[in-house]
Amino acid sequence: MNKKIIFLIYVIGIIALLAIGTTSAKNSDMDTSDWVNITVNNVSFQIPPEYTGGNEWNSGYLLTNVFTFGLVTLDNDKSLRNNYGYESTLDELYDAEELEIDGHHAVAFYSHRSIVDHDVTYLYFESNKTFYALSYDGNDVNDTIKKIVSYSPKSKFTKEKFDEKLNKMQDDYIEEQREYEEAYAYDEGYNNGYSQGAMNSRNNHDDYFAYYLFYRLLTTI
């Protein structure tokens, strides 16, 4: 290989390493002396002054609303499915990003929320086999947000396990919504059609009607 090419590769490599080192140092050297401790799911986090003054409870912390700043635990499949599934399929979602933050696997969703008329980021990360959702007013995952995440224990899942779990939760959420929509459509059709004497429609859909009754029973338990 040409010596000039080898030298160029060597220089590029050094520049890349210096850039990575500078970024890491910037995050590590951040002044957190005025940050405040909060406890979420028995895990201690630290947050900067601009996010203090919110409501803290065992499974979460909220400042004003989830569109301003929130950190919640998603410690079971139902909460993870409903939260992650909703955000990952949102019509107002305009971008998504996978990240590695100081030993934490993470996924960020960027959306513009018409209800508050500003961008909102939802950052999902795993810490010690527990998933968390960090939401805030903003359109990036900056050093401050990364520092907040870094205070929790490292990921225990492999990247493959992390992706597999979230993909399953998204698929389950989409399937659940499809079933709800079908049940609602039948409900509307039943109220508007069957009640007026459209018996043939019901007789032709006995299996669907049985599913609908089963669904309605489950939702009343």
Image: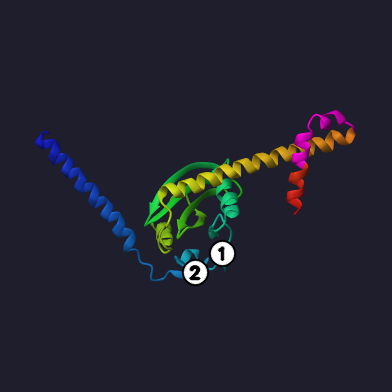
Q: Is residue 152 above or below residue 20?
A: below
Residue kind at label 2, given as amino acid type: Ile
| Percent x, y of residue 86 | 58, 46
Q: Which residue is mark 2?
A: 38
The residue drawn where x is 60% and y is 41% is: 174
User: Which residue sits furthest left?
Assistant: 3
Mark 2 closeness class: few <14, some 14–19, many ≥20 residues within 10 Å: some
Looking at the picture, does residue 107 appear above or below residue 3? below
**Picture quarter with the C terminus:** bottom right
- Labels 2 & 1 near each other (Cβ < 8 A): no
Marker disc for residue 59: 1
Inspect this view and state whether residue 17 appears.
Answer: yes
**Which mark sits nearer the N-terminus, 2 or 1?**
2
Instruction: Give the percent coordinates (x, y) of residue 99.
Output: 40, 49
| Residue in the foreground of this view, choosing between 173 and 6 | 173
In this rendering, position of residue 96 left or right of residue 190: left
Q: Does residue 209 show up magenta in the picture?
A: yes
Q: Which residues are magenta?
A: 197-212
Q: Residue at x 56, y 62 (%)?
A: 62
60 with respect to 21 (left or right): right
Query: Which image quarter is the N terminus in?
Result: top left
Residue 116 appears anywhere in the view: no
Q: CA distance from mark 2 to mark 1?
A: 11 Å
Identify the residue shown where x is 42% and y is 63%: 153
Q: Who is closer to the viewer here, 38 or 54?
A: 38
Foreground mark, 2 or 1? 1
Dividing the picture into quadrants, the one containing residue 112 is top right
**What kind of element bears circle 2?**
strand
| Residue at (48% x, 46% y) in the render | 164
Q: Amino acid at mark 1?
A: Ser
The location of residue 105, given as percent across then percent down, is 42, 52
30 or 108: which is nearer to us?
108
